[in-house]
Image (cartoon, helix red, strand yellow):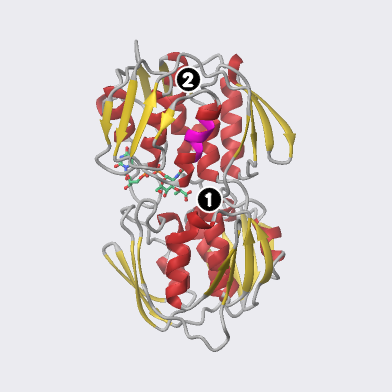
Amino acid sequence: MSSYRIVGAKRPHGDVNISGSKNAVLGILAAAMMLDGPCTIENVPDIVDVRAMLEICETLGAKITPVSDGTYEIDPTKINTFEATNVKVKNIRASYYLLGALLTRFRKATMYMPGGCNFGNRPIDLHLKGFQKMGAKGTRATDIRDGIIRIVADELKGTHIFLDVVSVGATINLMLAATKANGVTVIENAAKEPHIVDVANFLNAMGANIKGAGTDTIRVKGVPVLPGGYSYSVIPDQIEAGTYMIAAAVTRGDVTIHNLIPKHMEPLTVKMLEMGYNIEQGDDWIRVSIDDDVELEPTNFKTSPYPGFPTDLQPQATVMLCQARGLSRMHENVWDNRFQYIPELQSMGATISVVEKMALVNGPVHFSGASVNALDLRAGAAMVLAGLAADGVTTVYSANRIDRGYEKILEKLRGIGAEIEHIDDELEHNPSEEE
Ligand code: EPZ
């Protein structure tokens, strides 16, 4: 496996361009598998999870043609199987969107249970209960044998679904299954993330009838055909953008992040202003800087579904809290166990204690370089940020986990003055990770 080696304590400056959203494009690629015609998808990030999803779609029989950098022509009309049982399915969590897509295309779907993830249990009961309400069978936990889900539906019927937990995945998966169902499906207590809106906008561009995405009530009127035939450009990645905003913050750099949607960044921007950072913004850019004499104020973060503070920026923001003077709190309210990276940060000098779902962060701390592990995608990104701020050299192992969600991270960080290199470490082996 590989690692990133960072020589820290530089003050990055300059410009970073944000890529397409991982969590939007994974849903959009699955949605493309339901179409009755071809489509073109633009601004697709070249990251490990997207490469895996493209491969899975090809194993189903979809024809995928790279047109140019980040643009693909997708022809799903030759898909010849409802079984997504390629081993790659286990490597990415978002493959579960193929349940909704294949159920719509074939009224059947068979696939491996998406693996758990190392920040707590990641059930899919809400997905399966929703499919059941729409008329599918094989959705009970007892129906799942050998880690394989086998669902069938004589007919998918419009219905009323209330999600008792706000779930991004369940919202998208049920939206997919409802797109060609008979009648209207209402999804209440739906998640409102920008990537959900993007999947709905893609489907509507291809002929679907989805209203209310981005609110907590989504209405899907089933249509007989999804003709496709259009191009769609994926929105910028909210989490990648937030990661680079925090990279500028933790190093007291001066960086302008381009190709983002400022509104999507508000949950982070408001907290950075509270801490004392300078934030300037235009239509599609945000500049982060800090005056030399400013001591950062401590603050409290609470992760929650959008428009709350995103859990996927929690590890990165915790690194930023280590720079503030005094006691800050990070409440993780979405995942059961998303503080496993704390000991890695402590090995770099962080003074953090975890009490149940809250991390108490004392600062300011001057990180020292160390050898640390990327325990998952976002924890790995947080280790890189800590390395950028640290005195000395930091090596972040299992860099492949970071490459799952950050396109050209080496080039982008070097572009703002970071001293970072990628090392192929044949000796180290880490099991592939789930997200
Ligand atoms: C998506 O995961 C993202 N992944 C995650 O980002 C992100 O952390 C998460 O949404 C929350 O924003 C992708 O989009 C590929 P959920 P997902 O269903 O859909 C519970 C990253 O770093 N739940 O919104 O799996 C669940 O346990 C990744 O890019 C159920 O109880 O998350 C959790 O507590 C990491 N039953 C809460 O809902 C279900 O059937 C939110 O999970 C489904 C979820």
The magenta stretch spans residue 307: no
Instruction: Kindly report the distance in space between the C-alpha atoms of the residues bearing marks 1 and 2.
Output: 28 Å
- Magenta-highlighted stretch: main secondary structure? helix
Q: Residue at x 60, y 14 (%)?
A: 78
Crowd around label 2: few <14 · some 14–19 · many ≥20 (10 Å): some
Magenta stretch? 198-203
Q: Is residue 368 visible?
A: yes
Residue 192 vertical placement versus 223 (above, below): below
- Quadrant of res 259: bottom right
User: What secondary structure is marked by label 2?
Assistant: strand
Give the mark toward the camera: 1 or 2: 2
- Quadrant of res 52: top right
- Please state the horizontal and vertical placement of residue 249, each as a whole percent of the image: 54, 72
| Image disc number at residue 430 | 1
| Amino acid type shown at disc 1 | Asn
Image check: 366 left or right of 230? left
Residue 76 vertical placement versus 318 (above, below): above
